[in-house]
Structures are given as structure tokens and as C-alpha cells.
Amino acid sequence: MTLAARRGPAGRVLETGDRGLPADAAGLTVAEFLAREPRLADLWTPLLVIDDGALDDNIAFLAGWVAERGLELMPHGKTTMAPQLWWRQLDAGATGITVATPSQLRVAVEAGIPAVMLANQLVQPGAIRWTAEAVAAGTRVWSWVDDVAGIDAIERALGGSPAQPLEVLVDVGRRGGRTGARSLEAAVTVARRAAASPAVRLAGVTGYEGSVAHGRGAEALASARSYVDELLAVHDALAPLYDDSDVLVSAGGSAYPDVVGAAFAAASVDGDRTRFVLRSGAYVVHDHGYYRQNSPFDGAGLRPAARGLARVVSRLDAGTAIVDAGKRDFPFDEGLPEPLYAIDAAGERMPLPGAVTTKLSDQHGFVRIAPDSPLAVGDVVVFGLSHPCTMFDKWRLVPVVDAWGDRLDAIVTDLVETRF
């Protein structure tokens, strides 16, 4: 992976399908377009925009927080599916990237990511064989298993004894949850099968506390902590089955990194071969909604690094403004976009007291405003967005500005390419 490739798609030729870019950008390379020093005002709405300063601060904060506790971070790459952001996370200290599907794994391998965790059971024969080839070529890959059927699938796909066994982590869950062995006994059964298989290497345990706890109330925090304790108990029970190589214990989404980090730090022993790995991913841009409410680091290390921009296209009803952004543009599954303020035709910030997004259709947003609001057709509404994991998938290229301000004269310094 060259330095140029890590920095982004400088040589990529822009197309008419690259939404938000002005018409005269088509046919230029990304580097040629950026050399013009375009401003946000030159781009077409709707837009998703990244604040590079906040992005950098978020990456640096969690990297430091994890390192201070002697832990590792393999952030979930599905949040952005943007290899140039993954490399920024790796350069800040992350020891790998997590993905959710074999197709995402392929993107990571082709981007040169040296260590990848596939947070899922690998069962498709073609994907298993491709993964084995990637491992043989030098990429380290861990996948999850929660059933002996998963190990059977790997053995059938690879046949006999592969030159290099695939590394697997036993996924620990709870009854009624998502994936994961439902008891200590079930997890040990899977681990014994893995330890005896010539096609895989038992490499540790893993799980996701976010599937068993919701919110930041006392009950949710206790549930998350008890789950991590169960995960650590499985790890202890598997100790006789591990070989002499390193072992991973992994958990930690973006809602409970503090709970997981505290438990992992307490379990960590200097000189031990166990690596304790968090997988938080949404922290990279944080948000104005779900994670603002649920992250322990909101305002204490993390701040929103993305905004949505939409233009008013209709004000025929006094108390409603219709904007040119809908479900195909902004995330809506964990809360509707929050109108923060507007920018008028003169480029000045305009407050929007009490403004609320009430509905999104495919390409329009409905914003309730005061009937006497001066908001006019053509004004730009700046939105706070909720849930980064459904934010980036709507965009092939996301413009970046050095630091978010209240005006549209900020120069676009980069374009982040997504690979969904």
C-alpha cells in the first residue's frame, strides 16, 4: 500500500454520479478538483460533510484512551467503509480493522490492511477459500464461530489440512440475543472442536455487549458488565485449549467502551500473551443523536465530526420548510436529522429556534419551524445527524473541510471515498 493510496483516491476520475459535486467536476481527477480549492458553496446539496479537525481529535482521543489502559483497538470499519479513514486509525495506533461481511473483508485486504477481524461466522464456501488465500498471502484474519457447524463449513470448503489454518474466535452470546454460543458449556464445546480441527486455530473469544444492553441506565450498565464478565469466564475456561501463540479477547462497541475497557484492564496481566481488543467504530465521527446520548465520551473526548447540508426548496406552508434531503441522503434509523441552524443567501448564520425534522421521504425532508421564521427558499439548513453506521453508505465521496464553521466559504480539502 503506497502512501498516496493511503491518503485517498487522488487519481480517481470524478463522474456525474458523484453526488454533491458541481457539474464541471466530472472528468477531473480528485487531485485536479481539489487543486481548484472548491468551497462548500460550490457544491450542490444535499451534502454530507466531514470536519477534519473533529475527526482527527476523535481518532486521537480513543487511541490514547485505549493505549493508557494497555488495550488494543481494532475499530469497526463498517461504520465508514472508507480505507483512507481506516489507515488514519491505524496510523494513530489501531492494531487492525474489524469488518462485518466477507465482501467488506475483501475491501480491507485489497486496501492493504494487515490485520482484519471478521465479526461474523464465515460459512460461504467461496468466501472461505478466498480468505484462506488472503491469509496465505500475508493478511492476518480472525473470524468468529459460535457453533461446530461453522467449523464444519470451513473444513468442507478447504478440504483436508490447509497450509495455514484460519484463526477463529469463539463468539459468546446470550439466549435471545444475536449470535454467540448460549452458555459456557456450549462455548467450550465449540472451542474443543476448533482446537481439534486441522483447518482452524483456536485464537480466543469474542462477543458484543451491545446486543444485550441498551442505554446508559444503571440496569443497562450492569447488564453490559455482567456480559463481559461472562466473556472473561469463557476465556479462562478455554485456557487449557489454547496453543502457545497470542490469544485475543474482544468486545466493545461504541456505547460501552468504558465498561468493557475497565473489565479488560482489570483482567490484563503484564507479560501474558492475551491481547484485549476493543472494536468501537462509530467514535470516528461520533454524532448528534444516538451516540451523543449513549457514548460515555460525548463532550469528554468526542464531538460530532459530520454535518448534513440541505437547501430549502419550498415554504408554501407557514410552519414547514421542505428541504432537498431525504432517506436516500441522511440516516434516519436512530433518530431524524436535527436542524442546528441555517445559512442564508448572504452566507450568514440564522438561528432556527425550536426547529424539528418531522418526516423524511425519499428525497425530501419536512422541517417544522416557527410560522414567522425568515427561513427562505434557497437557504441552507445545517443538520446534526444520528448513527454513523447508516450515514456513509449513502455517499460514494464525502467532502472534508479543515474545520467546520458557520459559513459556506470553507475550502474542501479532501474527498473521502467509501467502498460499500
Image (cartoon, rainbow, N blue to C red):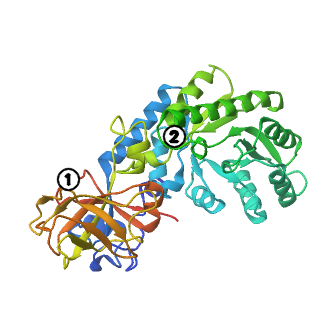
Give the residue drawn at x 83%, y 57%. Answer: 153
Q: Label 2 is placed on what type of residue?
A: Ala
Closer mark to the observer between disc 1 and disc 2: 1
User: Where is mark 2, residue-wise?
Assistant: 94
Circle nearer the N terminus (1, 2): 2
Q: Nearer the viewer, residue 129 or 312?
A: 312
**Decide: marks 1, 2 in contact (CB < 8 A)?**
no
Where residue 201 sits: x, y (%)?
79, 42
The answer to whether residue 6 is above or below residue 203 is below
Q: What kind of element bears circle 2?
A: loop
Above or below 307: residue 146: above
Q: Position of residue 418 (x, y in %)?
A: 46, 63
In the rendered image of this protein, does residue 57 appear above or below residue 343? above
* Label 1 Cα neighbours within 10 Å, binned few <14 / some 14-19 / many ≥20: few
Question: In the depicted view, which residue is nearer to us: 325 or 28?
Answer: 325
How many numbered discs? 2
Image position of 392 (left or right of 150): left
Residue 38 appears in the picture as rendered: no
Residue positioned most to the top: 270
For the point 83% across and 53% down, which residue is it?
149
- Is 285 placed left or right of 278 in the picture? left
**Label 2 neighbour load within 10 Å: few <14, some 14-19, many 20+:** many
For disc 1, the marked residue is 405
